[in-house]
Amino acid sequence: MKGFVPTPHETVDAMVELLFRSRLPHSDDTVLDPGCGTGEFIDGIIRWCERQGLALPRITGVESDERHLPVLRAKYGRLSQVRIRHADFLTDDRAKYDFIVGNPPYVAITGLSESEKARYRARYASARGRFDLYILFFEQALRSLAPSGQLVFITPEKYLYVDTAGPLRDLLARYHIEKIHLVREDTFAELVTYPTITVVRNAPPGRTQVRRRDGGQVTVELPLGRDSWLPLLEGSAPQQAAVTLGDVCLRVSCGVATGADNVFVRPADGLDPGLRRFARPTVAGRQLTPETTDIPQRFVMLTPYNRDGRLLPFERLGALGRYLMHDDVRERLLARTCVQRKPWYAFHETPALREILRPKILCKDICERPQFWVDRSGDVVPRHSVYYIVPRDPATIDVIARYLQSPAAHQWLAQNCQRASKGFLRLQSRVLKRLPLPDDVVRAVSDGRASAHLESPPRQMELAFHAVSPR
Ligand SMILES: C[S@@+](CC[C@H](N)C(=O)[O-])C[C@H]1O[C@@H](n2cnc3c(N)ncnc32)[C@H](O)[C@@H]1O
């Protein structure tokens, strides 16, 4: 079932309360529940009307999955005020509704067929990048909202800050977003979505009341445009970034994807001497633990590329060629999809070795709190679960690393990075590149020297600031 997650009663009741808070529904008002599943919200509206002693408004539930229809028919077949439409809400008609409430499906782009992706991209301004169905449900619901109509959705909080949802924020900010309530993480039991209830009125923009998970509240004016709303929601104004990390770095990227680490990554100890000239120290995210004081170098990556990142001709691979030709090894390499477009012994992605083999800063792709390691020698080839940050000028590596390790940078990253499960952060390169640098760091970097920051580093920074040991 595509994105079927029923909403618990108490959340439904709280949302229906918000839906009708500013205006009681009349019997000829229309209410839409897009993606109604087995009718949790319809039931909630019926409960609410019974409690209030009010007649039911005209309710439409739209559901694309026919497996829910028997339940829906059994529940509402005899209620003239409830109509169930078996339809795709995203390609449905453009009727207007006075009230819209629901829990749209959370279905990542990877769960959509090619034809669905193409259809949605053609139809929705918000279907950009790696969009999710709930984002499109938001856009379609806004289109379906009558003037002064009220919309209440529960969705993942990610739309507040991920780049992919920039076009949706741009759309939403043209309406009056009355409330954003970041609700309990365990609202959907095991499912970690960081749920958020958003209340929108089809009226010109006004102030938004935000309730955070820690109970704190702020009232904000959301900006027009695509920028993340998180800094505002957390009560700090967005920083104006004159200079960002991306500006002072040659490259901020995800590590090397070989497509077959079980072939190319080998223990450093006991390596066949013939393979040594192709072996470069490598590290995976899971090996960068908070306790590590050095970048661990227990593994090497066998690299059939020269320092410029050019694939070596097979006949020049010697012992590496012989190793790769073993039946089981060759089979594993041939099983990769990338071999349709590149030589069978190449990596899945061509490694940017010219930039990688320079002094750089490393961090894990997913972490509880950001932490950075300095590869001063530039020898380490990060694996796909590690991001690498290459300063334009190697002399500025410490000043940049120290800033990355500072509370100010951590706060910005916590506000701008996407979240993985358990509140962990995803440090993606496009977010890292946007990290604003304060003036003193910018000055130190443009002077090309290690700043005074380095001379007396605070103790906790020193502890968390690791360097690769010289070999
Ligand atoms: C997260 S569930 C919510 C179900 C119900 N509203 C609730 O809160 O308990 C989302 C529902 O949307 C339905 N759905 C997914 N894609 C849809 C589409 N394109 N049009 C209509 N319904 C869709 C799914 O089948 C699923 O029942």
Image (cartoon, rainbow, N blue to C red):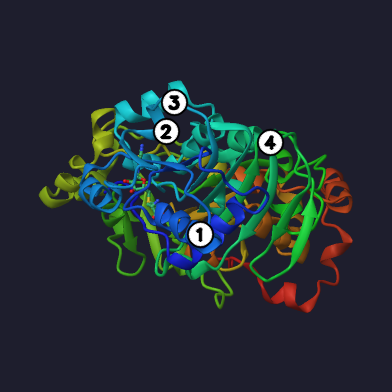
Label 3 sits on a secondary structure element that is helix
User: Is 425 positioned to the left or the right of 67 in the image?
Assistant: right
Task: Work out how far the residue at label 4 is from the one at label 1, CA to CA, in angstroms.
Answer: 26 Å
User: Can the viewer see residue 404?
Assistant: no
Look at label 4 and name its amino acid: Tyr
Q: CA distance from mark 1 to mark 3?
A: 37 Å
Residue under the image location 67 percent in, 71 percent down: 214
Give the left or right position of residue 206, taking residue 365 as reference: right
Which tag, 1 or 3, sits closer to the chain's start?
1
The local secondary structure at tag 2 comes to loop
Residue marked by disc 2: 310
The residues bearing labels 1 and 2 have C-alpha atoms spaced at a distance of 67 Å
Mark 1 lies on a secondary structure that is helix
Q: Which mark is residue 48?
A: 1
Identify the residue shown where x is 40% and y is 44%: 108
- Identify residue for label 4: 175
Q: Are marks 3 and 2 in contact (CB under 8 Å)?
A: no
Q: Amino acid at mark 2?
A: Arg
